[in-house]
Amino acid sequence: MQLADAIRPRLKINGRHHARPRWHVGNRQLAQAVSLAVVAVVLIPIVYLILGALGAGQEGVDYLIRARTLRIVGNSIALMLSATLFATLIAIPFAWLTSRSDLPWRRTWLVLGLAAMVIPSYLTAVTYTEAFGPKGILQSLLEPFGVERLPGIKGFAGAALTLTVVTFPYIVLPVRAALLHCDRSLEEAGQSLGLNRWGVFRQIIMPQLRPALSAGMLMTALYCLSDFGAVAVMQFNAFTRAIFIQTESYRMDKASALALLLVGMTFVLLLLHSRMQLRGRHYRVGTGASRHLEAQPLGKWKAPALLFCASIVFLGVVIPLLILFSWLVGHTITDPVQVPLTLLLQNTVGVSAVAALVVTLAAFPLALLAARGATRFNRWLVNLAYAGNVLPGIVIALALVMFATQNMLSIYQTLPLLIVGYAIRYLPFSVGATESAFHQINPRFEEAARSLGLSPWAALARITVPLARGGILAGLALVFLNVMKELPTTLILRPIGFRTFATRIWSAYDEAFLSSIALPGLVLILVSAFALAIILRREEAVA
Amino acid sequence: MSLQRFALFLLVAALCCIIAVPVMGDYVLTVYSGRNESLIGPILAQFTEDTGIETEILYGGTSAVANQILTEGENSPADVFIAQDGGALGALAAAGMLHKLPDATLERVASAAFVSPDGFWTGLSGRARVFVYSPESLDEHGLELPTSILDLTGEAWSGLVGWAPTNASFVANVTAMRVLLGEEETAGWLAGMIANGVQAYPKNTPIVQATIDGEVVGGLVNHYYLFRFLAEDPDITSTLHFFPAGDLGSLINVAGAAVLKSTDQPYDALALVDYLLSDTAQEYFAQRTYEYPLVATVDPSVDLPALADIESPDIDLSDLADLQGTLEMIEESGALD
């Protein structure tokens, strides 16, 4: 499961394969040198964040400990906890239904459910404000029943709903994979000892799901803390929105103080998670031929199960798409600024492609070190490369603006800086995917190639890379998908006049030109869906 | 499509992207605009078409862009700054970052109230702060039109008013309140509005939409947004109310422009400012953005009280420079929570 591996944030390198092939010294040194350079770039935002926050001095400290800032902390934590909880509660039954039950059209439900992750959070949020607003579509449907006005979903409710819907696929993916790999014989043993189906699920299956579940939940929690689009649209004062408001009025010291606090919180979350993982013992599934998993009959639960899946798909995909379509054809105010769709497509795909390739190349030596040269030093190097996981896009962008304006004005407002911003953010995805691909290659293959006279480089190029190709490319596609949707980094770091789908949607939303949101939004979803489909097809092939 | 082919496609796309990046010549006029592209973009494109002077334009919030120029200092790539309010221009003038404009440019503007007293910036178009409201909703709730912006903290308006607390024009309006009413009373008004359940929106446009949808009865906006809706749908009943008798709610502000001292193209920069004061551009502002033209030769295009007839509070727009202080006050008030 490359995808699940790639999106699994972690602090330590799994020591799965300890076999260390003898490495040619020159080879390792080169990988180390390149990795050092990459990590140096990754550290720029952290350094500038600290410098920026120090610049705020006592004023910054006062700012951080005032009640209003503490409320932001509270808001962010509440949002993270509730969205993660709800997403989990949806994801577990959804994953089970689409993998282990005899639910009709299982695959279709799965694909449609996962499709929620190709719709950027800001688009989902914008369409929800239309659907569930005080005088929105839901209200007009309820009008005959005397509902004059709904309370509206701006604020906490809207942000939590949006984030639940867009993040639950991140839990479904690993959990479903784990369900498919569960050892059937354990369940049979449980049944024979008198457990009913619920008992089997609770006592046999759930413990086996724990690692996957905790990885997925962590991913969701990190997503919630770093998401900007949903909280900005719903005007919920979580960290990212507060930072953006400070950045918008160019108060960089306060913005960095807030950002540093957010990074600290994210880091603590990762730390807690890794502690929990260390404490719990997850027993491995026994070896031997795994039994074919037969589908569990749903019986009278079929109808509720179908209803459940349908409502998830309805919330996650149908509502956003329907509303975008209605804006496309509905007569809303014409935007005086018409940007050709081809230009947006070209810019978005082009810059995302460059970013994906840069990230993949940068991740390669790091993954190599992680998989084949796991010394203490290298372990730290790779851990630092995962910094993107604790650095939300808006934080990276903010720090890079400070770096460029203070030190390298020549790259300020240029594409290279934007690419660096994307690269730092999404490097973990690529390192994760590539590393896990390397881990799956038996080092004996490389040793055999070496013993047959291939140089270290040739062994790498002709044995390792071809074998790891699938995983590396899956990471590439995943980074591409995420860069295309990325909003805050693009907004803050883009060169003057450079537009992508994300920035176009954002500025059209800002000015309420709904028809200008619709077309770029739909095309962005289409392109993202295409990329996701390719990734998922490979997933299936691997599984 | 397989992953391999997809990767190949990305490679090709990346190469195209790198090749397609235009190599910008040094001779491009850099404009920092605090006005949204939908308002100013078309006339800037027209400028390039008419004069052949290429421009690149950074769009952002007015106070953000002003602060960005202040931070960039001498190194700022900006040649021209276009702002949504006089205060931001005043702040840059006070920091000594603006070029003095020639008298010939400043004299185009009919009223001396709408140019910098020291000649550092000029107004381009006028915008009045108003109360947009739906007459039906007003009747429905049995309300009377407010005579002052200060009335909106009253119980009767609880939960029925919209504002856009981060919008530059709103910030300028609150700055005017600070200048004329003092800090304490202004902070009190903000607190009163929040206690009264004011609905926050990200921008002016959604406030107008909210009055149409009946989400709120009325809202504090600039006058021209409503006309964009009316142009699309003449049946919209929402309408404008100008607070009477020099009330702070009826502040008239300007969108203006200035030339940066650090510019390397002063002539082209001035050419742009002059172009924006030409009849062509002023007619554009009158007809397309529904603002008040500021030159004597062009009239407003829509049904509006004459600029001179609005009883605006008596204030020098350059005095509205402390936007930062206002932003802090708004943040402290809890309006952004």
Image: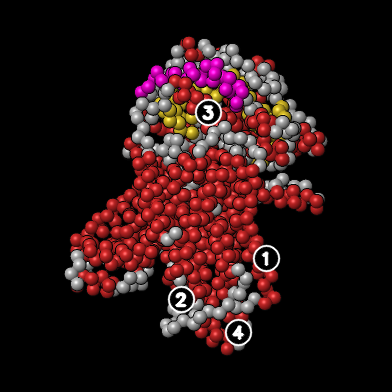
Q: Are marks 3 and 4 on the same chain?
A: no
In the image: residue A424, left or right of residue A176:
left
- Classify A79 as above or below A502: below
User: How far is the residue under mark 3 from the one under mark 4?
Assistant: 71 Å
> Mark 4 or mark 2, which has the lower sequence index?
4
Residue visible at 50% across and 53% down in the picture = A528
Q: What is the basis of the colouring in this image? A: secondary structure
Residue visible at 58% across and 61% down in the picture = A112
- The quadrant holding residue A164 is bottom right
Q: Mark 4 sits on what residue?
A: A195
- The quadrant holding residue A330 is top right
- Camera-nearest residue between A130 and A333: A333
Q: Mark 3 sits on what residue?
A: B42
Q: Residues within 10 Å of mark 3 (few under 14, many from 20)?
A: some
* Residue B219, visible in the rendered structure: yes
- Camera-nearest residue between A334 and B186: A334
Residue visible at 23% across and 63% down in the picture = A458
- Subunit of label 2: A
Q: Among all residues in the image, which is located at the extreme left?
A: A453
- Quick one: SS at disc 3? helix
In the image: residue A521, left or right of residue A389:
right
Q: Mark 1 sits on what residue?
A: A307
x and y percent of residue A492 in the render?
A: 45, 41
Pointer 2 and pointer 3: residues touching (CB < 8 Å)?
no
Q: Which residues are magenta?
A: B264-289
In the image, what residue type sits under mark 1?
Leu
Residue visible at 41% across and 33% down in the picture = B71
In the image, what residue type sits under mark 3?
Pro
- Camera-nearest residue between B182 and B72: B72
- Subunit of label 3: B
Q: Nearer the viewer, mark 2 or mark 3?
A: 3
Q: Mark 2 sits on what residue?
A: A282
